[in-house]
Image: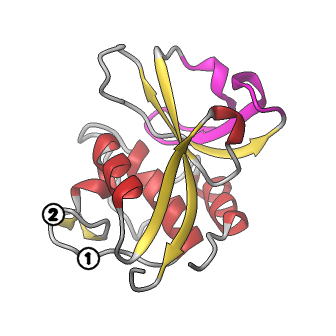
Amino acid sequence: MPEYDRRAAVQYAVRWAYGRNPDFYDFSDLGGDCTNFASQVIFAGCGVMNFTPTYGWYYVSLNERAPAWTGVNELYRFLVSNRGPGPRATEVELSRAEPGDVIQLDFGGDGRFDHSPVVVRVLSPTPPGILVAAHSSDALFRPLSSYNYRSLRCLHITGCSPSGE
């Protein structure tokens, strides 16, 4: 499977952490823009969308997109179960986080994850040493430990398939 371009993903995150790419709708007033931003970052490193209706991962416009493009839990389900085109991920221990990976945070402790920041630098494999970029509450090089979360999951992007394999 083709490799995920982590450098391109991080460059995109740094470029757009405090701005909005006009090619994508800003979902800040529709529940938050964090997973839209995470999807854009992943797309920058992968370059392939999955246009499977309902269960794929794609963005054409505000009204033509997959739930996984903007939904925290939907993105998780897509990445860990995708066998078609596009990115794939495995849930790993936080100590295995790499730049370009997505960390999902559960703020309420209810098992539903609420936020999808993207890893942009790893100084050490612990929450204070993992620096992220995010939208909704825009951030760049923010320590993961500065979030008040109950639990987290690390989605390690394992590759990107052009056609499904």
Q: Which residue is outermost to the right?
A: 123
Q: Which residue shows up at 35% across the image and 51% down it? A: 75
Element carrying mark 2: loop
Q: Position of residue 141 (x, y in %)?
A: 71, 38
**Crowding near the residue tagged with mark 1, few <14, some 14–19, many ≥20 C-alpha atoms within 10 Å:** some
Vertical order, 147 against 98 (above or below) = above
Element carrying mark 1: loop
Q: Position of residue 116 (x, y in %)?
A: 46, 40
- Residue corresponding to mark 1: 51
Q: Amino acid at mark 1?
A: Phe
Is any atom of residue 8 visible in this view? Answer: yes
**Front residue of 21 and 111:** 111
Is any atom of residue 28 visible in this view? Answer: no
State how the image is colored: secondary structure
Q: Amino acid at mark 2?
A: Thr
Inspect the magenta stretch and tell me whether residue 145 lies in it. Answer: yes
Query: Over which residues does the magenta segment extend?
Result: 124-147
Vertical order, 161 against 73 (above or below) = below
Q: Which residue shows up at 27% across the image and 40% down it? A: 29
Marks 1 and 2, how far apart at CA: 9 Å
Q: Which residue shows up at 32% across the image and 49% down it? A: 77
For residue 54, which numbered disc appears in the image?
Answer: 2
Vertical order, 74 against 5 (above or below) = above
Q: Quadrant of residue 119?
A: top right
For residue 85, which numbered disc appears in the image?
Answer: none
